[in-house]
Image (spheres, rainbow, N blue to C red):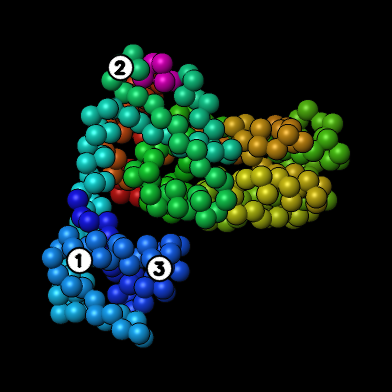
């Protein structure tokens, strides 16, 4: 693979100074000089002209600089490809897990999957629920992790450029704290929310939430709707402060310990299932095919095609 001192070389060339490069790299200027000297010795050429004002690339240094980033990217790609091949050989499936994407269903289906595919190995990858971490997780789905289990529908999968396999359908319910006016009820009707605040995931993220929003807005204007970006701990905290109910499904009921869920007499549901990259690897595809088989799912459960 490439000489890792090339990374230091690029920073020195870009900054024109050993000391400025040291600041960016969080190492001492002496360490930077040693790395450059070692690289020059390894290559057999002088890369920089040292001056009191800084450093200047030599002709040889300019040639190396032109190709250094390409060399680094090529090497990183080769290493990543090798790691993917190694993981394919090991049969490792990496499932993401966070507070609002619990992997509890794997307790039921993984033993069955393993019976059909004993070579598959399960690796749980934790990730945070903040917006930046979730966005990064989706950008790297198929690279850093293979799949996660969570709420899925066509809107979300199209927006996130993913595919999914529906494992079950969950009724939308409402979670409230013990001091909420509706906390004592075992079952709720939409009219019970008149004069109350109800938090929904903001429009355009999940079709199931959008359908509920349309119904409430059109026919139940006495309900005040509040928005949250996603279902996570801060949304529950906001509801706790505002004495507000929040629409969730059962897998999310443990996100906040002060909330408990109550079923509602409406027909709104959300799909819960496996989400993965739009073009899964053969290993992940085999995992999906096996999950579909052991769960005895119909073809309709894989209604999220690759052309979303």
Q: Earlier in the sequence, mark 1 or mark 2?
A: 1
The residue lying toward the viewer, choosing from 265 and 54, is: 54
Residue, disc 2: 118
Assess disc 2: are there few (<14), some (14-19) or many (≥20) residues with their C-alpha within 10 Å of its C-alpha. Answer: few
Residue 40's disc number: 1
Q: Earlier in the sequence, mark 3 or mark 2?
A: 3
Q: Earlier in the sequence, mark 3 or mark 1?
A: 3
Residue, disc 3: 29
Question: In whole angstroms, how far apart are the C-alphas of marks 3 and 1?
Answer: 17 Å
Above/below status of 129 relative to 111: below
**Does residue 260 appear left or right of residue 180 in this picture?**
left
- Tag 1 near tag 2, CB within 8 Å: no
Residue 104 pos. (x, y %): 53, 26
- Tag 3 near tag 1, CB within 8 Å: no
Assess disc 3: are there few (<14), some (14-19) or many (≥20) residues with their C-alpha within 10 Å of its C-alpha. Answer: some
Question: In whole angstroms, how far apart are the C-alphas of marks 1 and 2?
Answer: 51 Å
Residue 147's disc number: none
Residue situated furthest top in the rendering: 115
**Which residue is found at the position 27% from the left and 60% from the top?**
5
Q: Is residue 110 magenta?
A: yes
Quarter where residue 131 is shown = bottom right
- Tag 3 near tag 2, CB within 8 Å: no
The magenta region covers: 109-113
**Which residue is found at the position 28% from the left and 20% from the top?**
119
Label 1: state its secondary structure: helix
Quarter where residue 295 is shown = top left
Residue 281 pos. (x, y %): 26, 38
**Which residue is found at the position 73% from the left and 34% from the top?**
257
Question: In whole angstroms, how far apart are the C-alphas of marks 3 and 2?
Answer: 53 Å
């Amino acid at each position: 693979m490439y000489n890792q001192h090339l990374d230091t070389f690029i920073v020195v060339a870009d900054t024109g100074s050993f000391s400025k490069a040291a600041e960016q790299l969080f190492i001492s200027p002496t360490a930077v000089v040693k790395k450059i000297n070692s690289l020059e010795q390894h290559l057999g050429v002088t890369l920089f002209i040292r001056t009191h004002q800084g450093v200047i690339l030599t002709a040889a240094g300019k040639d190396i600089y032109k190709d250094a980033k390409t060399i680094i990217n090529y090497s990183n790609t080769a290493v990543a490809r090798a790691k993917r091949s190694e993981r394919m050989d090991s049969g490792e499936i990496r499932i993401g897990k966070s507070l609002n994407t619990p992997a509890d269903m794997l307790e039921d289906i993984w033993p069955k999957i393993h019976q059909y595919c004993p070579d598959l190995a399960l690796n749980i990858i934790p990730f945070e629920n903040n917006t930046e971490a979730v966005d990064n997780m989706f950008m790297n789905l198929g690279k850093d992790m293979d799949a996660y289990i969570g709420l899925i529908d066509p809107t979300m999968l199209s927006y996130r450029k993913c595919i999914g396999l529906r494992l079950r359908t969950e009724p939308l319910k409402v979670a409230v704290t013990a001091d909420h006016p509706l906390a004592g009820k075992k079952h709720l009707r939409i009219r019970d929310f008149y004069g109350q605040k109800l938090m929904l995931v903001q429009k355009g993220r999940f079709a199931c939430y959008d359908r509920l929003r349309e119904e409430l807005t059109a026919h139940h204007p006495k309900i005040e709707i509040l928005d949250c970006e996603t279902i996570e701990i801060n949304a529950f905290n906001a509801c706790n402060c505002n004495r507000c109910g929040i629409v969730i499904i059962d897998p999310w009921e443990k996100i906040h310990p002060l909330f408990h869920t109550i079923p509602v007499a409406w027909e709104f549901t959300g799909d819960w299932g496996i989400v993965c990259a739009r073009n899964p690897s053969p290993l992940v595809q085999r995992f999906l095919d096996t999950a579909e088989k052991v769960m005895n799912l119909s073809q309709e459960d894989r209604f999220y095609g690759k052309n979303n």
